Image (cartoon, grey):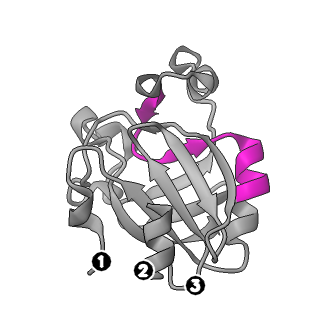
Amino acid sequence: MAQWVGSARDNDGLPFMLVDKVAARVYVFNAVGDLLGIDSALLGSARGDTTAPGIGDLPLAQIRPEHRTTPAGRFVAHLEKDVRGSSILVIDYEASIALHPLVPGSPHERRAERLRSDDPDEKRISFGCINVPQDFYESVVRRAFAGTAGVVYILPETTPISDFLRE
């Protein structure tokens, strides 16, 4: 996929990221396609490649379990501050999807332990956002996207990839 991005120049000269939902991994590249870093990620607890209409307007408690997906697609993303002033990479504003450092969650969720697991199925826990280790976020993601937008490709897990590529 990274080779296709480079040869098609689909990233429009911007840094880019690949999110492999099947493997629960994030790959970050600079604008010319050099790999900057790879790490594990926590993803939406529900499998699927689309977002339920209006989901970004709902309080978390009202998001049904089957709608807690990390949507597939090509997104132009940028760094912002969340409501607490912490840095996040906004991927899909309307659907409230972002990539951000690991949030602790409740103890029974074992988010940090899940993030370190080798089993991708263990990494399905979020409402749809992508959680990565704090140090990876700071040293790779924030540096790559600082002062610029970038392209995030979230690879599908239930739909053909060709459905998400630009012509």
* Closer to us: 161 or 105: 161
**Quadrant, the N terminus:** bottom left
Question: Do callouts 1 and 2 mark residues in contact (Cβ within 8 Å)?
Answer: yes
Counting other residues with Cα less than 10 Å from the Cα at mark 2, is it few (<14), some (14-19), or many (20 or more)? few
The correct choice, above or below, for 82 with respect to 126 in the image is: below
The residue at 55%/48% (across/down) is: 26
Counting other residues with Cα less than 10 Å from the Cα at mark 3, is it few (<14), some (14-19), or many (20 or more)? some
Which quadrant of the view contains residue 117? top right
Going by the image, does 120 lie left or right of 131?
A: left
Tell whether position 162 is magenta.
no
The residue at 37%/48% (across/down) is: 70
SS type, badge 1: loop
SS type, badge 3: loop
Residue 166 badge: 1
Tell whether position 133 is magenta.
yes
Mark 2 vs 3, N-terminal side? 2
Magenta span: 123-140
Residue 162 percent across, percent down from the top left:
23, 64
Which quadrant of the view contains residue 14? bottom right
SS type, badge 2: helix
Mark 1 vs 2, N-terminal side? 2
Residue that numbered label 2 is attached to: 8
Going by the image, does 32 lie left or right of 26?
A: right
Amino acid at dot 3:
Gly
The correct choice, above or below, for 69 with respect to 75 in the image is: above
The residue at 62%/58% (across/down) is: 28
**Quadrant, the C terminus:** bottom left
Q: CA distance from mark 1 to mark 3?
A: 15 Å
Residue 58 visible at all: yes
Residue 13 badge: 3
